[in-house]
Amino acid sequence: MSMITLEQIQQALDAADEITPRTAKLRPSAVLVPLIQKSDGLHILLTQRSEHLRHHAGQISFPGGSMDDTDDNLVHTALRETEEEVGIPQTHIEVLGKLPLQPTGSGFLIQPVVGLLPDNVELTLCQDEVSSAFEAPLDFLFNPDNQIHSYREYGGKNYSIYSIPYDGWNIWGATANIIVKFSQLINHSAYIDKL
């Protein structure tokens, strides 16, 4: 499999904007899917949430959170939360586009926003929200052989979930689902073919 390029990602995101569903009743939130261009290809920045948090404590996640009344839109939410959690100024993030909305069993509707970070980005973690951060290669995360599919019962319903073990980390739940949907946009270009 050849290395995934920013051009492929931009084409997929342009198409994904057209297929984002409209859903109500869930709490609007947003995450940044932060890409970093390295010499060996694109990487994704991930964080580990602090253990004392009320929602998703200790889980691997993207920077993000609930929409505030002061946010202009969900892209602004993703950028604001990223600056708060990992210290990357909003002006240093190049927004590439949005992925389809991701509902969660815990009552959130997540808007994933894909952004490109500078390759020399320095993080300042907000220890109250984020205990650590790491990068994982996009090509590894997007490889279907590394995406483990299963089902989990929550509130009397069966949910399709993914997990992606990487370098001692276990990426699962909504974060893994967002990665898998993103990879499907790239790997199965059905959405792109209609353009």
Image (cartoon, helix red, strand yellow):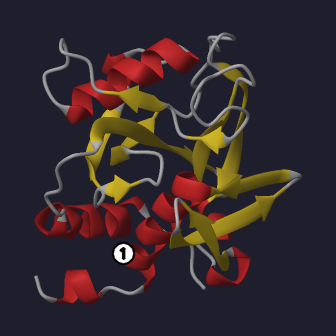
Instruction: Report the amino acid beneath label 1.
Output: Leu
Kindly tell me whether residue 170 is visible in this rendering: yes
Residue 106 or 169: which is nearer the viewer? Answer: 106
Q: Residue at x 29, y 37 (%)?
A: 27
Q: Residue at x 41, y 38 (%)?
A: 31
Q: Which quadrant, please, contains the N terminus?
A: bottom right
Q: Which quadrant, please, contains the C terminus?
A: bottom left
Residue 64, x across and y down, in percent:
44, 31
Residue 40 in which image quadrant: bottom right
Question: Disc 1 designates what residue?
Answer: 185
**Secondary structure under the numbered disc 1 in the rendered image:** helix
Q: In this view, does 22 lie above or below 182?
A: above
Residue 119, x across and y down, in percent:
56, 34
Q: Residue at x 71, y 65 (%)?
A: 164
Task: Say whether residue 21 is left or right of residue 185.
Answer: left
Residue lying furthest right in this view? Answer: 168
The mark total stands at 1
Residue lying furthest front in this view? Answer: 156
Residue 117, x across and y down, in percent:
46, 34
Residue 127, x across and y down, in percent:
69, 11
Kindly tell me whether residue 113 is visible in this rendering: no
Task: Say whether residue 121 is left or right of residue 80.
Answer: right
Label 1 environment density (alpha carbons within 10 Å; few <14, some 14–19, many ≥20): many
Q: Is residue 114 above or below residue 9?
A: above
